Amino acid sequence: MLFSVVPESGMPLAEQIAASVRRALADGAVRRGDRLPAARELADTLNVNMHTVLRAYAALRDDGLIELRRGRGAVVTGAVPREQAQVIEWVRRLVTDASRAGVGLEELVGMVRKHYAKEMGG
């Protein structure tokens, strides 16, 4: 199944749904022009609230991966390389975890810069 959620994972359901689509794009299981299931249909299938699916679709739209149109639903407009899709997913998890731990944006960015510089030899 293209979409899956694990309620007890600790990761928000909308993020899990969006991550499923990103993985499918990276793996080639979903391609440009493909339609994603209607939000209500997917919500029923996954046994989640329709607004959860709509939040996932909005995140994918904001990433430039899908287009949302009344009457047409969610249509895939872009794709990302597998490595980039993984990094996007890791960053989303990092931000969620940092927020839960009380780490502010500037502190988190500073941590990332520090570790990135070490990794790149600078």
Image (spheres, helix red, strand yellow):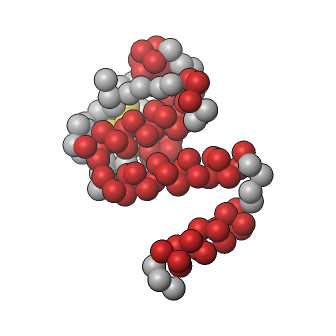
Tag count: 0
Front one among 1 and 74: 1
Residue 2 visible in the picture? yes
What residue is drawn where x is 34% and y is 56%?
A: 83
Front one among 64 and 18: 18
What residue is drawn where x is 58% and y is 52%?
A: 94
Q: Is residue 121 above or below residue 3?
A: below
Give the image location of residue 92, x and y in percent.
54, 50
What residue is drawn where x is 54% and y is 19%?
A: 48
Q: Is residue 11 above or below residue 121?
A: above
What residue is drawn where x is 56% and y is 30%?
A: 9
Q: Residue furthest right?
A: 102
Left/right of residue 65 with respect to residue 113 in the rendered view? left
Left/right of residue 46 with respect to residue 84 in the rendered view? right
Left/right of residue 66 with respect to residue 46 in the rendered view? left
Give the image location of residue 35, x and y in percent.
29, 33
Give the image location of residue 90, x and y in percent.
49, 51
